[in-house]
Amino acid sequence: MVKYYADPKVGAVAGEKRIHIADKDEASSAGEGLYWKYESLLKRWDAQLGSVVGAAGELFSIRTQLYERIPADTLIEDFYLTLTVLRKGYRIAYAEDAYAIENSSASVGEELKRKIRISAGGLQASWRLRDLLNPLALRSF
């Protein structure tokens, strides 16, 4: 991940999240693993276009001088932090060769709770950093 910081326009680096699926896991675990493969593909394409938008909290880094204190009630810190990097005019690189392995959610219910939290956190971050939604404020990566 460190090699990406040779580019002074890189403010953060996102790694890849992978799901470990045990033989005894529910079918929903396979779906979760497939979702993260799709998410990784999107990040790869985003990086080719200029910048990844967000990073999975399991594995990402940020330039020290770009770190901002996160409001205590923030629901998804990784997304909020990476948006602040973009807001400052830096890009987020994608290191697909750097990955973290996580167990799948314990149940469909737990996965649903996680998805609800992520959705709510995305809305919260979008509202707090709503100036990023202005298409007239062009940012170059």
Image: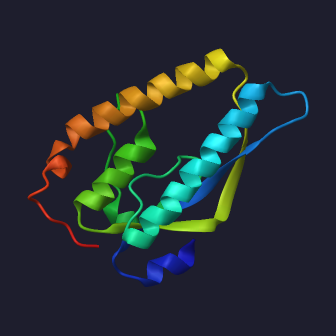
Q: In this view, does 2 lie to the left or right of 63?
A: right
Front position in the image: 17 or 44: 44
Q: Position of residue 118 (x, y in %)?
A: 45, 31
Quadrant in which residue 103 is drawn: top right
Name the residue at the left extreme: 136
Quadrant in which residue 96 is drawn: bottom right
Q: Where is residue 59 in the image (x, y as percent from the top left)?
A: 58, 54
Query: Which residue is found at the position 19% from the left and 67% from the top?
Result: 139
Q: Where is residue 85 in the image (x, y as percent from the top left)?
A: 32, 59
Query: Which residue is found at the position 33% from the left and 66% from the top?
Result: 65
Asked if residue 37 is positioned above or below residue 119 in the image, the reply reads below
Total labels drawn? 0
Q: In this view, does 18 lie to the left or right of 56?
A: right
Residue 89 can be seen, yes or no: yes
Look at the image and tell me in which quarter the C terminus lies: bottom left
Quadrant in which residue 21 is drawn: top right
Look at the image and tell me in which quarter the N terminus lies: bottom right
Name the residue at the top extreme: 109
Asked if residue 106 is positioned above or below residue 71 in the image, the reply reads above
Residue 13 can be seen, yes or no: no
Query: Which residue is found at the position 57% from the left and 68% from the top?
Result: 95
Q: Where is residue 30 in the image (x, y as percent from the top left)?
A: 75, 36
Colouring mode (rainbow / by chain / secondary structure / one colour): rainbow
Q: In this view, does 30 lie to the left or right of 111?
A: right
Query: Which residue is found at the position 13% from the left and 51% from the top?
Result: 134
Name the residue at the bottom extreme: 6
Asked if residue 131 is positioned above or below residue 114 in the image, the reply reads below
Front position in the image: 111 or 28: 28
